[in-house]
Amino acid sequence: MSRGYPIDVAKGGVLEKRDFVVITLPADFDRSTLTGSLRLYPSTLSTLEDGLESMLQEPCGCFEQASSSNYPNVLVLNYIGNEGNVASAATVKRAKDLLAHGYQRLHRLTSARSAASSGSAAIRVTRRCRPTG
């Protein structure tokens, strides 16, 4: 193993009362750089929630990048809405916040594009209509 590269060990299965994993480290590794983490999932649902959480992205970049980075947020919220109670309230809130931030970013980018293409320095404001009731 080359110096400076991480070693990833993954093990799946059902955890019994006792279990172990052997990790072989190089003889010449720098002990001051050693870090580790452990994730245990008590159920398949908790594994799924961790996967959903990892799909969420902060929208950034130009219009096309912001659109493509916001799309997974839409998918996660649609999945949560269709499947019911598959995610924690914190995951749902984060997904909604990221989606709202993404829409705001896209709105700003399209407003700036419209103003630039019309030759006007004015920023156009669009009202959003929400259904009542």
Image (cartoon, rainbow, N blue to C red):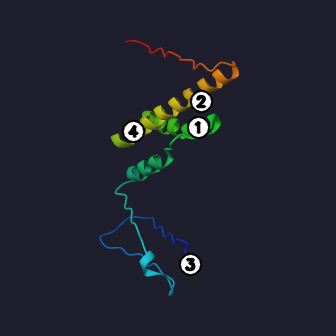
**Residue 112 x %, y %:** 61, 26
- What's the residue type where badge 2 is placed? Leu
Q: Earlier in the sequence, mark 3 or mark 1?
A: 3
Q: Which residue is mark 2?
A: 109
Callout 3 touching callout 1 (CB < 8 Å): no
Q: Quadrant of residue 2?
A: bottom right
Which residue position holds label 3?
3
Query: Residue 64: x percent and y percent?
Result: 64, 36
Q: Nearer the viewer, mark 1 or mark 2?
A: 2
Residue occupying the far top of the picture: 132
Q: Of circles 3 and 2, which is in front?
A: 2
Q: Nearer the viewer, residue 4 or 131?
A: 4
Residue, x 40% and y 12% (percent of image)?
132
What amino acid type should be assigned to the residue bearing mark 3? Answer: Arg
Task: Determine the secondary structure under disc 4.
Answer: helix
Note whether 79 is above or below 25 in the view shown.
above
Q: Earlier in the sequence, mark 2 or mark 4?
A: 4
For the residues labelled 1 and 2, say whether their Cβ atoms are less than 8 Å apart: yes
Q: Which residue matches tag 1? A: 66
Comes first in the chain, label 1 or label 2: 1
Specify the amino acid type for callout 4. Val
Left or right: 88 in relation to 100: left
User: Pointer 4: what residue?
Assistant: 92
Q: Secondary structure at mark 2?
A: helix
**Crowd around label 2: few <14 · some 14–19 · many ≥20 (10 Å):** some
Q: Nearer the viewer, residue 21 or 102?
A: 102
Residue at (62%, 40%) from the top-left corner? Answer: 65
Looking at the rendered image, the quarter that the C terminus falls into is: top left
